[in-house]
Image (cartoon, helix red, strand yellow):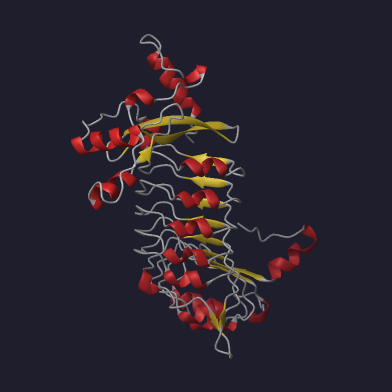
Amino acid sequence: MEVYTSDSSDTDSREQKTIDFGRMNLDLITLEDHLSSPHKALAKSKSDIETLLLNHNRLVGLPSILQQFTNLKILDLSSNALTQLPDAICQLPLVTLIAKNNLLTNSSLPKSFMTKQQTGNGSSTLKELNLSGNQLTHFPEQVTEMRQLKYLYVGGNKISSISKDIWKMQGLHVLSLGGNLINEVPETVGSLSQLQALVLCDNLIENLPMSIARLKNLKSLLLHKNRLRHLPKDIVALKNLTELSLRDNPLVVRFVQDMALKPPTLLELAGRMVKASGQRPGPYDIPRTLAEYLNSANCCVNPNCKGVFFDNRVEHIKFVDFCGKYRVPLLQYLCSSKCIEPEQTALRAPSSNNASASSGFMMRKVLLG
């Protein structure tokens, strides 16, 4: 998040360009009165004001006089009772718009956050948009138009999915979606090449897309309080990642070590035998459906096993070194429970006397915070 501060040498200049009406118990009428009164606005010209703080009041709407603040860069509307963001707000040259903790719904938002130019083409000066803690039920599609946006906060809503058009937001550095009802992350998230922080905590996510591994600039990945049982194996490619939060996920609180193996079907057994024998039936030897079935075989991940599996497999958690900082549990598929690779000495199967101690050791090796 950008910090809009300055050296002490120009502090006075900053203060002259700021109006702070936060925590004054203002409603719409009293706010308009304050903004219209030269005395109450400290005789500042509206065109000089760059920061307007209206947080923690009783506002249910915004006065039309805001349009006169033609150089406004930062507008803080957090912790009010707003039910509408007017389209006119998008005509201001805002860099930061904070509207968290209000009563905004998807229909409350402007149809577009783009400033309409005379040429008909839209643009946006916004670099930070905070809509957290509102009543959004789906991802606001209009934000995908904002190619220059760097920081998007929409956590603490009731969003159930992420727009597949998220890839258009190539300028994003921070994407915060924690505290929603999201159960799936689209592959297109992996196209956000500038992303440095991805917050997905406190959702209903069971799987992450493999494309997460393409986020080469990612430094922080918050996944706690989800339903993850494993991570994509290619996540180890994220060499810049310094913060990975996994606590309160099944992969941390309950390791998958004793998955029950259902008896394979006769079809699977026959298919394994054919593949193991190295035979390659011709197109006229067996029905096409069986040929397609044989071609769908998956190789066992154990390099010491040359077996295959089709629908019947063993799920096993293997601990993998991650950037030299900690070990993470990754899910692998085996053709048989006998194919589990031997772990390193420190992680070998414990004896019955040391089972609980070893389990605790493995838990400490996973980043829980």
* Picture layout, residue 65 above or below residue 50: below
Q: Residue drawn at (31%, 47%), measured in percent from left and top?
A: 282
Q: Quadrant of residue 29?
A: bottom left
Q: Residue drawn at (49%, 83%), measured in percent from left and top?
A: 64
Q: Quadrant of residue 71?
A: bottom right
Is residue 59 visible in the rendered image? The answer is no
Q: Residue drawn at (38%, 16%), measured in percent from left and top?
A: 356
Q: Is residue 170 left or right of residue 334?
A: right
Q: Quadrant of residue 147?
A: bottom right
Q: Position of residue 276 (x, y in %)?
A: 34, 32
Q: Residue drawn at (74%, 62%), measured in percent from left and top?
A: 11
Name the quadrant of the N terminus.
bottom right
* Picture layout, residue 287 above or below residue 103: above
Q: Is residue 2 left or right of residue 23?
A: right
Quick one: which residue is furthest to the right in this view?
Answer: 9
Q: Position of residue 87 (x, y in %)?
A: 47, 80
Choose between 111 and 24: the one closer to the eye: 111
Q: Position of residue 255 (x, y in %)?
A: 37, 29
Quick one: which residue is furthest to the bottom in this view?
Answer: 118
Is residue 179 visible in the rendered image? The answer is yes
